[in-house]
Amino acid sequence: MDPIRVLFVCPHNSGRSLMAEAFLQRLGQGRFAARSAGTAPTTVAPLVREVMREANFEFRDHGTADIRDLLREKPPYHYVITTSGPDELRDMPPLPGQTVRLNWPFPDPERVTGSPEERLAAARAIRDDIRTQVIRFLHDLA
């Protein structure tokens, strides 16, 4: 059976969408082909690299992707999941009609404030919330 194709999207593809992709790839046990992209991709946020390294993920050589490029792939994605608020993704291109669109609004780890320890704690909480949501998604599809 072909894997379920899932595309995670956030504006910069620098944090939330990358975390969701990594967790689905690991926890999905080969049932999913997960990718991530941004509407205006930049680079992986250093804070995200750090908290994901703590969870045994390496984003050292991981680049970011543009959603327009990934939506051209065939076959189309079964699910496109935005990991930020809907207002942040005004530039989303249209999706094929059969694609299920979901929104998982998480705070942006690049926008957390406070001391370095507070920022790290906030990024860890976002990471853990994303992992929990991926687990819920897996249970819903089981």
Image (spheres, helix red, strand yellow):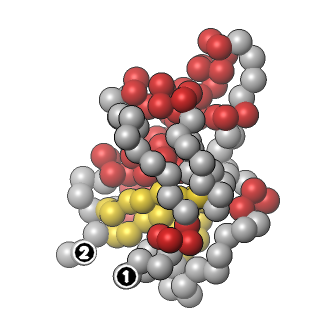
Residue at left 47%, top 79%? 72
Quarter of the rendering occupied by the N terminus:
bottom left
Q: Is residue 105 left or right of residue 9?
A: right
Q: CA distance from mark 1 to mark 2?
A: 11 Å
Disc 2 is placed on an element classified as loop
Residue 90: horizontal and vertical position, in percent? 76, 66
Is 99 located above or below residue 36 in the figure? below
Whichever of labels 1 and 2 marks the residue nearer the N terminus, that label is: 2
Crowding at label 1, few (<14), some or many (≥20) Cα neighbours within 10 Å? few
Location of mark 2 (residue): 2
Residue at left 38%, top 69%? 5
Residue 124 in sight: yes
Identity, as a three-letter code, of the amino acid under mark 1:
Pro
Residue 89: horizontal and vertical position, in percent? 72, 62
Q: Is residue 92 left or right of residue 51?
A: right
Question: Foreground mark, 1 or 2?
Answer: 1
Q: Are marks 1 and 2 in contact (CB under 8 Å)?
A: yes
Residue at left 65%, top 21%? 119
